[in-house]
Image: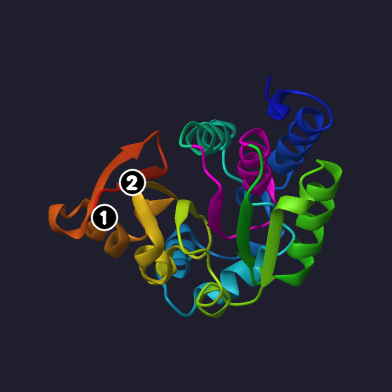
Amino acid sequence: MTILTTNPLAPLLDRLFEEAKTASPATSSAIADLSPEERSRLMQSKTDYIDLYARLKDVPLPVSRETGALLYMLARGCGARTIVEFGTSFGISTLHLAAALRDNGGGRLITSEFEPSKVARARDNLTAGGLVDLVEIRVGDALQTLSIDLPDTIDLVLLDGAKALYPEVLSLVESRLRSGAFIVADNADYSPDYLARVRSPGNGYLSTPFGDDVELSMRIG
């Protein structure tokens, strides 16, 4: 049995995924004036992405159902006790990861989000799912919030914030990754520097694309 498929979490996730369908970036009036090329440029910029994500402050930007299930299975399968997440948004991915921690017997999930209104939504969702006690939400720029007070050993990392910052966030946590730790990077195609790093044989990772939009890596160094 897993709490992922029982009350109160299962119906909560169903509702959140349904809500996300109607509030996707593709249908958001907040970015209607941006061309696909400009959106892509903002996604890959190390500075201008702030404008894009400010426009999307009311949009959930969740992982897919398949990626959510993958996150749960990886965290549960490796017996994760310490997880770091970059990009909380409304907390859909956070719920999956925290569910694995609960089913593993407990642990600590540190997640970072720079949009305060999203933090409030995520905290409400985690409370509704009965998982808020396992999660520490840090508000602000992840390059600051994830640079201090991390666990000595990290079992799993999810990268799902500003794509251009994936290499920098990986650098913050890299020395704490245990051998065999998983790193899941959503929409990693927008971060070619990150992909080059985790796919280079000499950098201590085994890495492969997973599905349409995820890069799954394992620390082997």
Q: Which residues are magenta?
A: 79-104
Q: Is residue 195 left or right of residue 70?
A: left
Which image quadrant is residue 180 in? Answer: top left
Circle 2 residue: 217
SS at circle 1: helix
Q: Residue at x 55, y 57 (%)?
A: 85
Q: x and y percent of residue 146 in the render?
A: 53, 72
Q: Is residue 170 visible?
A: no
Q: x and y percent of residue 102 in the render?
A: 68, 39
Image quarter in which the N terminus is found = top right
Q: Nearer the viewer, residue 148 or 34?
A: 148
User: Label 1 is placed on what type of residue?
Assistant: Val
Q: Which mark is residue 198?
A: 1
Q: Nearer the viewer, residue 206 or 176?
A: 176
Q: Is residue 119 visible?
A: yes
Q: Residue at x 61, y 43 (%)?
A: 97
Report if the CB atoms under discs 2 and 1 are less than 8 Å apart: yes
